[in-house]
Each structure stands twice: as C-alpha cells, then as structure tokens.
Amino acid sequence: MSSYYLLKSHNIDCWRGDDTHIATKDMYVIIGDEQNRMYKITLKAGFRCDGLSVPWAFRWFLPKWDSKNYLYSVAGAVHDALYTTGGWYGTFCREQCDDIFRSLLREAGISRFKAGAADKAVEWFAGGKDHWRNDEFKNKNFIVVTRV
C-alpha cells in the first residue's frame, strides 16, 4: 500500500452545478508518494461529476459535496477521474486510487475515522466492474495525469 500526500492544488474552487458539478476552469492537484514520485492530476474545464457517492441516509456523516471545503469535493472528483480511466490507464491500481482518495480527504481536514470509513465503503461498494473504467459522464477527454 502506498501513502500519498498533497503537494499543491490550483483552481479547485472552479465548480458550478447542484446535483452534477462541472469544472468551469482547468484545475489540478499534485500528489506525491513515499518513493518521491509526483503526479499532476488535471481535470479540464467541462469535467463532470456527481460528488462523493454517499447514500442519502449517511450524508449527515459525510456530505456528497462541500462547497465550503473544495478539497473534500475534489477528492471525490479525482477518485472518479482515476476510476474512469482505469487508474490513468494502469498507472495506479484500484487500491492506489482509493489511497489517493483517502489521502485527499485527510488533507481536506476529514478525520482518520471518516476518511477510513469512506475508503472502506469504496472498497466494498464501488470496487465492482460497474465503476472501474466507467465513463458515464463522458469525461475521458477532460482528464490528464502526468508524472512531474
């Protein structure tokens, strides 16, 4: 298991929409890992997502989207982007995509318990083939991951 951390973010507050959120500008996060590799994950203007896939009954615990804490919301968008592209076409396995998600939640100030619960929920409920490489929002052309 790899450990990731946020190095930089840019334009992460560039979203509009209520149920489906759309990036109005290119935004990115740069993450690093314990082997000193760095990756820039860019979501271009037009990227769409529906936020974190939190069932309605649990949104008191973790919201689907947080317009006051965009890094929290971007954690879900980045995770969606990585799953859409199969871990950016094999750069990351599912477990690493989930680690990046959990790490971004922690960087957003979410407690270890809540971030861990979100990670476990993803492992149990989003790990199926229905989510991996699923491009329901037609986002593939709006996602770029580069090693920096």
Image (cartoon, rainbow, N blue to C red):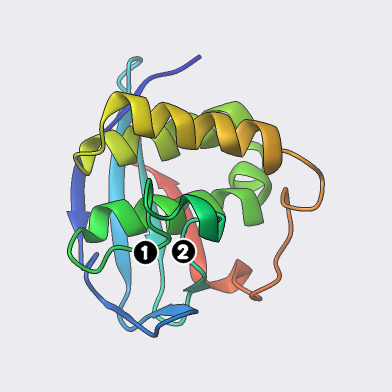
Q: Amino acid at mark 1?
A: Trp
Is the residue marked by circle 2 packed among few (<14), some (14-19), or many (20+) residues within 10 Å?
Answer: many
Report the front residue among 25 and 144.
Answer: 25
Residue 93 shows in the view:
no
Residue 126 shows in the view:
yes
Vertical position of residue 148 compared to residue 131: above or below: above
Labels 2 & 1 near each other (Cβ < 8 A) = yes
**Quarter occupied by the C terminus:** top left
Label annotation for residue 105: none
Q: Going from the N terminus, do you reach mark 2 or mark 1 first?
A: 2
Vertical position of residue 110 compared to residue 131: above or below: above
Mark 2, residue position:
51
Dot 1 falls on a residue whose secondary structure is loop
Q: State how many labels appear.
A: 2
| Position in image of residue 111 (x %, y %) | 26, 31
Q: Residue at x 25, y 38 (%)?
A: 110
Q: CA distance from mark 2 to mark 1?
A: 5 Å
| Position in image of residue 137 (x %, y %) | 64, 75
| Position in image of residue 147 (x %, y %) | 40, 40
Dot 2 falls on a residue whose secondary structure is loop
| Position in image of residue 112 (x %, y %) | 30, 25
Q: Is residue 61 left or right of residue 111?
A: right
The quarter of the picture where residue 114 lies is: top left
Mark 1, residue position:
65
Q: Amino acid at mark 2?
A: Gly
Q: Is residue 78 left or right of residue 56?
A: left
Is the residue marked by circle 1 packed among few (<14), some (14-19), or many (20+) residues within 10 Å?
Answer: many
